[in-house]
Amino acid sequence: MTKFFAKEVTLAAFLGMALISLSSHLASAETVLPVPVEPVLVSEIPLDAPTVKNVILIIGDGMDDHQITIARNYLKGTNGQLTLDKMDSRSIAQILTVSNIAPGVPVYVADSANSATSMATGTITSRGRISTSAGEDADLTTIVELASAAGMKTG
């Protein structure tokens, strides 16, 4: 296994956590709120899992449970459901942010740039960073770049 493949598997496992951690928990028609689920650790995802032909990843920027609840209550009422509530797979990710001056020091407010960078590269970075590291300003390889280099279609 090459170093490239190991990094690709690590990033794929990270995204796999976001995509398949809830796949075994389908919402029934009687469900009013999202089905509670047990979290799945990336280390528990088998590397020999079936190959998926296509993946569509929807990322709601700045959208956590509070915003979803407000939208559900406003659009459908307190007992209603959004299409999002009926999706086969749904997950959340916590993004860590660090200081640009002292990359080991946590910053408790993220922004869209460093959040997207963390999801695309698997690297913790600082606010305002787009595919670059905190402090050093080094370019970071994204999962899209890895997939493209492996001959996969991206877009």
Image (spheres, rainbow, N blue to C red):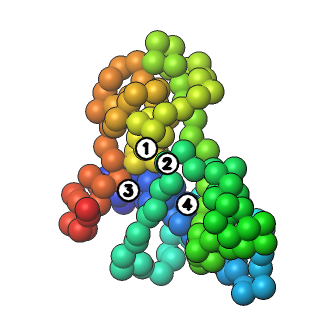
Eyeballing the image, is 53 above or below 70? below
Q: Nearer the viewer, mark 1 or mark 2?
A: 2
Q: Earlier in the sequence, mark 4 or mark 1?
A: 4
The residue at 46%/12% (across/down) is: 101
Q: Check disc 3 and give the amino acid type.
A: Glu
| Residue 87 on image: x %, y % | 59, 75
Q: Nearer the viewer, mark 2 or mark 4?
A: 2
Give the labeled residue for mark 1: 116
Eyeballing the image, is 105 above or below 24? above
**Label 1 close to label 2 by CB (< 8 Å):** yes
C-alpha span from label 3 to label 2? 24 Å
Give the labeled residue for mark 3: 8
Q: Earlier in the sequence, mark 1 or mark 3?
A: 3
Give the labeled residue for mark 2: 61
Report helix, strand or loop for mark 4: helix
The residue at 52%/19% (across/down) is: 99
Q: Residues within 10 Å of mark 3 (few under 14, many from 20)?
A: some
Q: Check disc 1 and give the amino acid type.
A: Ala
C-alpha span from label 2 to label 4? 14 Å
Q: Nearer the viewer, mark 1 or mark 3?
A: 1
Q: Check disc 4 and give the amino acid type.
A: Ala
The residue at 33%/47% (across/down) is: 142
Q: Nearer the viewer, mark 3 or mark 2?
A: 2
The residue at 67%/60% (across/down) is: 74
| Residue 121 on image: x %, y % | 40, 45
Give the labeled residue for mark 4: 18
Image quadrant in which the N terminus is located:
bottom left
